[in-house]
Amino acid sequence: MIRQETILYKLFLIKFSDMELLEQMQPDYKLCPTCGSLGCCKPHDEYKRYMITIHKGKRVEYEIYILRVFCDSCESTHALISDVLIPYGSYTLRFILHVLRAYFNRNCTVEILCERFGIAVSTFYDWKKLFKEHANLWLSALNKIYRVSIQEIDDFENIDKLPFSFFKRYGFSFLQRRKATNCNRSPWSRIFYSVFHIIAKWLLFSFKSILITS
Ligand SMILES: [Zn+2]
Protein backbone atom coordinates (compact mmCIF):
# COMPACT_ATOMS: atom_id res chain seq x y z
CA MET A 1 0.00 0.00 0.00
CA ILE A 2 1.22 3.52 -0.80
CA ARG A 3 -0.58 6.25 1.13
CA GLN A 4 -1.41 9.30 -0.92
CA GLU A 5 -0.94 12.47 1.06
CA THR A 6 -4.04 14.63 0.93
CA ILE A 7 -4.52 18.00 2.56
CA LEU A 8 -6.94 16.76 5.13
CA TYR A 9 -7.83 18.69 8.21
CA LYS A 10 -10.74 20.74 9.48
CA LEU A 11 -12.90 18.01 8.03
CA PHE A 12 -16.07 19.55 9.38
CA LEU A 13 -15.38 22.88 7.67
CA ILE A 14 -13.49 21.97 4.49
CA LYS A 15 -15.49 22.83 1.38
CA PHE A 16 -14.33 19.81 -0.64
CA SER A 17 -16.22 16.54 -0.30
CA ASP A 18 -14.32 13.27 0.05
CA MET A 19 -15.23 12.47 -3.55
CA GLU A 20 -13.83 15.80 -4.78
CA LEU A 21 -10.63 15.23 -2.78
CA LEU A 22 -10.26 11.80 -4.36
CA GLU A 23 -10.77 13.24 -7.83
CA GLN A 24 -8.14 15.90 -7.20
CA MET A 25 -5.56 13.32 -6.09
CA GLN A 26 -2.33 13.32 -8.11
CA PRO A 27 -1.03 9.73 -7.92
CA ASP A 28 2.45 9.59 -6.40
CA TYR A 29 4.27 6.27 -6.59
CA LYS A 30 7.89 7.30 -7.03
CA LEU A 31 9.11 5.23 -4.07
CA CYS A 32 8.41 1.51 -3.70
CA PRO A 33 7.54 0.91 -0.02
CA THR A 34 8.79 -2.69 -0.19
CA CYS A 35 12.29 -2.39 -1.70
CA GLY A 36 12.79 1.39 -1.62
CA SER A 37 13.53 1.63 -5.37
CA LEU A 38 12.87 4.97 -7.02
CA GLY A 39 10.88 5.22 -10.23
CA CYS A 40 10.34 1.47 -10.62
CA CYS A 41 6.56 1.40 -9.97
CA LYS A 42 4.23 1.47 -12.97
CA PRO A 43 0.42 1.49 -13.15
CA HIS A 44 -0.68 -2.13 -13.18
CA ASP A 45 -4.44 -2.44 -12.70
CA GLU A 46 -7.27 -1.13 -10.60
CA TYR A 47 -9.91 -2.62 -8.36
CA LYS A 48 -13.37 -1.57 -7.28
CA ARG A 49 -14.38 -0.77 -3.72
CA TYR A 50 -17.08 1.18 -1.93
CA MET A 51 -16.59 4.44 -0.16
CA ILE A 52 -19.08 5.45 2.52
CA THR A 53 -18.86 9.09 3.46
CA ILE A 54 -20.80 12.10 4.67
CA HIS A 55 -22.16 14.73 2.37
CA LYS A 56 -24.28 17.57 3.73
CA GLY A 57 -24.76 15.65 6.96
CA LYS A 58 -26.03 12.51 5.27
CA ARG A 59 -24.51 9.12 4.58
CA VAL A 60 -23.61 8.64 0.90
CA GLU A 61 -22.03 5.68 -0.87
CA TYR A 62 -19.86 5.71 -3.96
CA GLU A 63 -18.26 3.07 -6.10
CA ILE A 64 -14.62 4.02 -6.56
CA TYR A 65 -11.59 2.53 -8.30
CA ILE A 66 -8.23 2.11 -6.61
CA LEU A 67 -5.12 2.19 -8.78
CA ARG A 68 -2.57 -0.54 -8.17
CA VAL A 69 1.07 -0.20 -9.25
CA PHE A 70 3.67 -2.86 -9.94
CA CYS A 71 7.34 -2.52 -8.95
CA ASP A 72 9.69 -3.79 -11.68
CA SER A 73 12.50 -4.11 -9.17
CA CYS A 74 10.96 -6.35 -6.48
CA GLU A 75 7.83 -7.43 -8.37
CA SER A 76 5.47 -6.35 -5.61
CA THR A 77 2.15 -4.58 -6.16
CA HIS A 78 0.82 -1.65 -4.17
CA ALA A 79 -2.58 -0.01 -3.96
CA LEU A 80 -2.60 3.79 -3.86
CA ILE A 81 -4.77 4.75 -0.89
CA SER A 82 -5.70 8.39 -0.39
CA ASP A 83 -5.75 9.88 3.11
CA VAL A 84 -9.48 10.32 2.59
CA LEU A 85 -9.88 6.54 2.93
CA ILE A 86 -9.09 4.20 5.79
CA PRO A 87 -7.39 1.03 4.52
CA TYR A 88 -9.32 -2.26 4.68
CA GLY A 89 -12.66 -0.55 5.20
CA SER A 90 -15.33 1.39 3.32
CA TYR A 91 -15.95 4.19 5.83
CA THR A 92 -13.96 7.38 5.38
CA LEU A 93 -12.23 9.18 8.22
CA ARG A 94 -14.70 12.06 7.80
CA PHE A 95 -17.66 9.69 8.18
CA ILE A 96 -16.36 8.11 11.39
CA LEU A 97 -15.44 11.43 12.99
CA HIS A 98 -18.82 12.85 11.99
CA VAL A 99 -20.66 9.94 13.64
CA LEU A 100 -18.54 10.20 16.80
CA ARG A 101 -19.22 13.92 16.99
CA ALA A 102 -22.94 13.40 16.41
CA TYR A 103 -22.95 11.02 19.37
CA PHE A 104 -21.99 13.83 21.75
CA ASN A 105 -24.52 16.23 20.24
CA ARG A 106 -27.37 13.76 20.05
CA ASN A 107 -30.77 14.08 21.58
CA CYS A 108 -31.70 10.48 20.78
CA THR A 109 -30.57 6.99 21.77
CA VAL A 110 -27.39 5.42 20.37
CA GLU A 111 -29.59 2.91 18.53
CA ILE A 112 -31.48 5.68 16.71
CA LEU A 113 -28.23 7.50 15.94
CA CYS A 114 -26.71 4.34 14.44
CA GLU A 115 -29.85 3.70 12.43
CA ARG A 116 -29.64 7.22 11.01
CA PHE A 117 -26.10 6.56 9.75
CA GLY A 118 -26.78 2.96 8.72
CA ILE A 119 -24.25 1.33 11.06
CA ALA A 120 -24.45 -1.37 13.72
CA VAL A 121 -24.34 -0.27 17.36
CA SER A 122 -21.30 -2.54 17.88
CA THR A 123 -19.50 -0.77 15.01
CA PHE A 124 -20.10 2.57 16.70
CA TYR A 125 -18.62 1.37 20.01
CA ASP A 126 -15.67 -0.18 18.14
CA TRP A 127 -14.93 3.19 16.56
CA LYS A 128 -15.20 5.00 19.91
CA LYS A 129 -12.74 2.53 21.44
CA LEU A 130 -10.40 2.70 18.45
CA PHE A 131 -10.44 6.50 18.52
CA LYS A 132 -9.32 6.47 22.16
CA GLU A 133 -6.61 3.88 21.50
CA HIS A 134 -5.17 5.66 18.48
CA ALA A 135 -5.50 9.12 20.04
CA ASN A 136 -3.49 7.90 23.04
CA LEU A 137 -0.92 6.36 20.76
CA TRP A 138 -0.48 9.74 19.11
CA LEU A 139 -0.48 11.82 22.28
CA SER A 140 2.28 11.75 24.85
CA ALA A 141 1.69 9.93 28.14
CA LEU A 142 1.18 13.31 29.82
CA ASN A 143 -1.71 14.23 27.55
CA LYS A 144 -3.36 10.82 27.64
CA ILE A 145 -7.15 10.87 27.38
CA TYR A 146 -9.29 8.70 29.61
CA ARG A 147 -12.64 9.56 28.15
CA VAL A 148 -13.46 10.56 24.59
CA SER A 149 -15.30 13.86 24.36
CA ILE A 150 -16.25 16.26 21.60
CA GLN A 151 -13.10 18.28 22.40
CA GLU A 152 -10.79 15.38 21.49
CA ILE A 153 -12.66 14.74 18.25
CA ASP A 154 -12.37 18.40 17.28
CA ASP A 155 -8.69 18.46 18.27
CA PHE A 156 -7.87 15.46 16.10
CA GLU A 157 -9.94 16.65 13.20
CA ASN A 158 -7.85 19.84 13.25
CA ILE A 159 -4.43 18.16 13.10
CA ASP A 160 -2.82 19.00 9.79
CA LYS A 161 -2.09 15.89 7.67
CA LEU A 162 -3.02 13.58 10.54
CA PRO A 163 -3.66 10.43 8.40
CA PHE A 164 -0.36 10.77 6.52
CA SER A 165 1.71 11.59 9.61
CA PHE A 166 0.10 8.85 11.70
CA PHE A 167 0.76 6.26 8.97
CA LYS A 168 4.36 7.41 8.63
CA ARG A 169 4.91 7.06 12.37
CA TYR A 170 3.17 3.73 13.04
CA GLY A 171 2.90 1.94 9.67
CA PHE A 172 -0.90 1.73 9.87
CA SER A 173 -3.62 4.33 9.56
CA PHE A 174 -5.55 6.34 12.11
CA LEU A 175 -8.79 4.44 12.86
CA GLN A 176 -7.68 1.45 10.78
CA ARG A 177 -8.86 -1.77 12.37
CA ARG A 178 -6.42 -4.17 10.77
CA LYS A 179 -2.77 -3.40 11.08
CA ALA A 180 -0.64 -3.34 7.95
CA THR A 181 2.06 -5.95 7.71
CA ASN A 182 4.81 -4.71 5.46
CA CYS A 183 3.94 -1.32 4.07
CA ASN A 184 6.33 0.71 6.17
CA ARG A 185 9.62 -1.14 6.14
CA SER A 186 12.58 0.43 7.89
CA PRO A 187 15.49 1.64 5.69
CA TRP A 188 17.66 -1.32 6.88
CA SER A 189 15.02 -3.87 6.03
CA ARG A 190 14.62 -2.24 2.59
CA ILE A 191 18.38 -2.57 1.97
CA PHE A 192 18.32 -6.17 3.16
CA TYR A 193 15.32 -6.91 0.97
CA SER A 194 16.95 -5.29 -2.11
CA VAL A 195 20.23 -7.22 -1.64
CA PHE A 196 18.34 -10.45 -1.05
CA HIS A 197 16.28 -9.83 -4.20
CA ILE A 198 19.37 -9.13 -6.36
CA ILE A 199 21.10 -12.32 -5.11
CA ALA A 200 17.95 -14.39 -5.76
CA LYS A 201 17.69 -12.97 -9.30
CA TRP A 202 21.41 -13.65 -9.93
CA LEU A 203 21.10 -17.26 -8.68
CA LEU A 204 18.06 -17.83 -10.89
CA PHE A 205 19.90 -16.37 -13.90
CA SER A 206 23.00 -18.54 -13.21
CA PHE A 207 20.83 -21.63 -12.80
CA LYS A 208 19.09 -20.95 -16.14
CA SER A 209 22.49 -20.38 -17.87
CA ILE A 210 23.79 -23.74 -16.52
CA LEU A 211 20.67 -25.50 -17.81
CA ILE A 212 21.02 -23.94 -21.29
CA THR A 213 24.76 -24.72 -21.65
CA SER A 214 24.56 -28.29 -20.30
ZN1 LIG B 1 9.92 -2.60 -5.10
Image (cartoon, grey):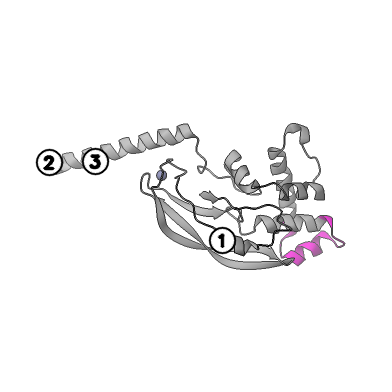
The region drawn magenta spans 104-123
Left/right placement of residue 210 relative to residue 165 reads: left
Left/right placement of residue 199 relative to residue 21 reads: left
The residue closer to the viewer here, 53 or 41, is 41
Percent of width and height locating residue 67: 48, 58
**Among the two numbered marks 2 and 1 on one chain, the one whose residue lies closer to the N terminus:** 1
Secondary structure state at the residue bearing disc 2 = helix
Q: Which residue is mark 3?
A: 205
- Distance from label 2 to label 1 (Cα)? 54 Å
Secondary structure state at the residue bearing disc 3 = helix
**Among the two numbered marks 3 and 2 on one chain, the one whose residue lies closer to the N terminus:** 3
Q: Is residue 107 magenta?
A: yes
Q: Which residue is mark 2?
A: 213
Label 2 sits on what residue type?
Thr
The residue closer to the viewer here, 122 or 172, is 172
The residue closer to the viewer here, 9 or 73, is 9
